[in-house]
Image: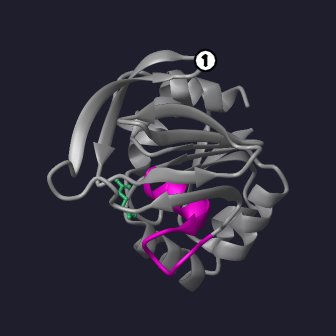
Amino acid sequence: MATGILAVQGAFIEHEHILNRLGADTIQLRQKSDLYKDFDRLILPGGESTVQGKLLKDLGMFDILKEKIESGMPVLATCAGLILLAENISNDTRTYFQTLPITVKRNAYGRQLGSFHYNGDIKGLGTFPMEFIRAPYIEAAGDNVEILAYVHNKAVAARYKKQLGFSFHPELCSDNRIHKMFLEL
Ligand code: GLN
């Protein structure tokens, strides 16, 4: 079956290209009717979480997707997607799906370090090229959340049940190991 990629805003096409290169089918989720198509995995891409969150609600997609995630659909979330999954956002009063028991800080690296590249270590994968773009980091995590990577002593990747979340953008590099890991969930 296919992977549904949220395509209301942000860097969704890059995820589609990687999955297609890996031989996996994809569907762009642009409107409510797309949510009734056949897909059994979900990608929440980077972009602007506030815009994505608002569009999801305005388009009537929010509750349906939240229910799919809560019932165990495997999710890969990057950057803004990670913010959408987080239970708490320390520097914003808004919250979205709240299915991943972590607290994130939005735009956590400030202006100077707004965007940067880092070769960091991911548990189970080894060194990975990480692109950070106005990224969040994870400030706190619940007991059953596995932190998969730290950069500058801050948690930047987490796994909880079938939810995989990254502060950085694995879709913007030529390394497809994170997408493979997601397809194997
Ligand atoms: N700064 C964005 C937000 O707060 C996330 C940036 C990204 O996805 N690259 O939603």
Residue tagged 1: 124
| In front of the other: 70 or 16 | 70
Q: Residue furthest left?
A: 112
Identify the residue at image location x=60%, y=61%.
86
Identify the residue at image location x=67%, y=70%.
33
Circle 1 crowding by C-alpha within 10 Å: few under 14, some 14–19, many from 20: few
Residue 148 visible in this rendered orientation of the protein: yes
Labels in figure, total = 1
As shown in the figure, which amino acid type bears the numbered disc 1? Gly
In the image, residue 87 lies in the stretch drawn in magenta: yes
Q: Which part of the image, by quadrant, shows the N terminus?
A: top right
**Secondary structure of residue under mark 1:** loop
Q: Is residue 113 left or right of residue 51?
A: left
Q: Residue furthest top?
A: 126
Q: Which part of the image, by quadrant, shows the C terminus?
A: top right
| In front of the other: 178 or 107 | 107
Report the span colored magenta. 79-96
In the image, residue 12 lies in the stretch drawn in magenta: no
